Amino acid sequence: MRFRELIAHHDPDARWASRVLLGVKYRPEGTCPHCDFHGQLLNGGFGADGRRRALCPHCKRGWSMARDAEGAEITVRVVKDLALTAVARRKRAGHDAPELASADHAVLSVPPRTTVQLVDAPAVPAPHSGRFDFNQPLRANSPLPRRHVEDLRLTTFLTSEISRVFSDNTDPPRCPHCAGIDTRLSSRPRTSTTLPSFHCRGCTRYFTRATRMPMANMLRKDMLFAFLPWLSQHRPLTHAAAEFGTSPEVIKARVGRFRVWLLELDPSGQYEQRVKLGLKVPWPVLPCPHCLAEATARPHGFKRTRTQSALTLGRRLFRCTGCNHFFDMPIERPRKT
DNA sequence: CGTATGTGAATTTCCAAGGG
DNA sequence: CCCTTGGAAATTCACATACG
């Protein structure tokens, strides 16, 4: 408010006031192409083509606002202005307050897309089809019973690694922030954790063994060990979300952090390959008996006839992406041992 | 009656905004 | 940075239908 007052004092033409953006919220105005609602719309972010999108508050659907991706101008209405709120609050309290011009309408231009500096994304390999078992149904509505198999080797491996992280060992590890080795046990233990905390002389930061680990700052500490057996099971995120009383997004983020960590622990990727929770199944490359080519084949459920059920036939159906024809393969029955 | 495949519905994931 | 929300999109599956 004070800065806006100062600017208004020296700038009667209001050429500069509009450049103050801090604390100003805006929304587009217009007509919904789906339900003809007219009025204030919701911001819908950017579409894949770079165009700004709007959401209809009435029918909740979204659309792209301007025709061009770059330089297009969109009229918006200022819905919130911190400075004006401060003025109103002061006036209500009976204090003096400056008269500030309100920027009712504004024009929002879509900035030219700048080439984004890529940060080092964690290099988690795309899962290849060998990770998944096509003898099993891929989804819950399949006629075949679905058995969820836990990979005990992964669970055991993670359990031991986690207990190593949570150990009371006071030998200073390498700094997780700068990878420096000049670290020592901190004489001033942090109150927020019971773990031994360390101090790095290189970057002067404090840390514990859990810093920058998948379970660091995990709000749901109770579900950490219960979660491990789920990682190796090929199940939808929603199952795990229901089990732990959270949303699929939370589970997805957690799976991602564990996959990155597993690759650090075992760069060969053997353990990371065992993670299956919530991963999309890649279409396998199979020899098509129709076009005789090796092509990716989409899973198409299980083969069935009028007389024989999918269970008795025991054949998985695929559809070749090259020639679009169907073919099936016998599934391997689990051997009873 | 078996086979091939088009298609609607169910299931699951993606995505961006927004709150803390 | 963590998590929630809610609609849209993608994927998967079995039913429907035509044909031999």
Image (cartoon, coloured by chain):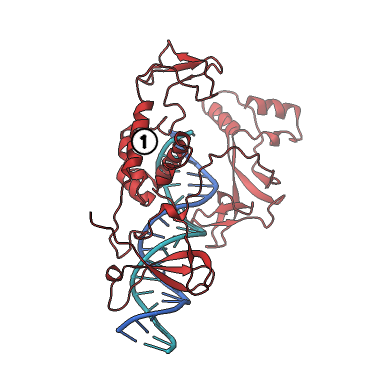
Chain colours: A red, B blue, C cyan
Answer above or below: position of A331 versus A245.
Answer: below
Q: Residue at x 49, y 75 (%)?
A: A290
Residue A156: percent from left, percent from top: 32, 37
Picture quarter containing residue A274?
top left
Q: Residue at x 64, y 43 (%)?
A: A104
Can residue A82 be seen by looking at this rendering?
yes
What chain letter is assigned to the residue under label 1?
A
Quadrant of the snapshot with the N terminus of chain A:
top right
Residue at the spot of label 1: A158
Q: How many marks?
A: 1
Answer above or below: position of A264 versus A171.
Answer: below
Q: Nearer the viewer, residue A336 or A326?
A: A336
Can residue A40 be seen by looking at this rendering?
no
Q: Nearer the viewer, residue A183 or A85?
A: A183
Amino acid at the residue labelled 1: Leu
Residue A278: percent from left, percent from top: 40, 50
Quadrant of the snapshot with the C terminus of chain A:
bottom left
Q: Secondary structure at mark 1?
A: helix
Residue A24: percent from left, percent from top: 60, 37
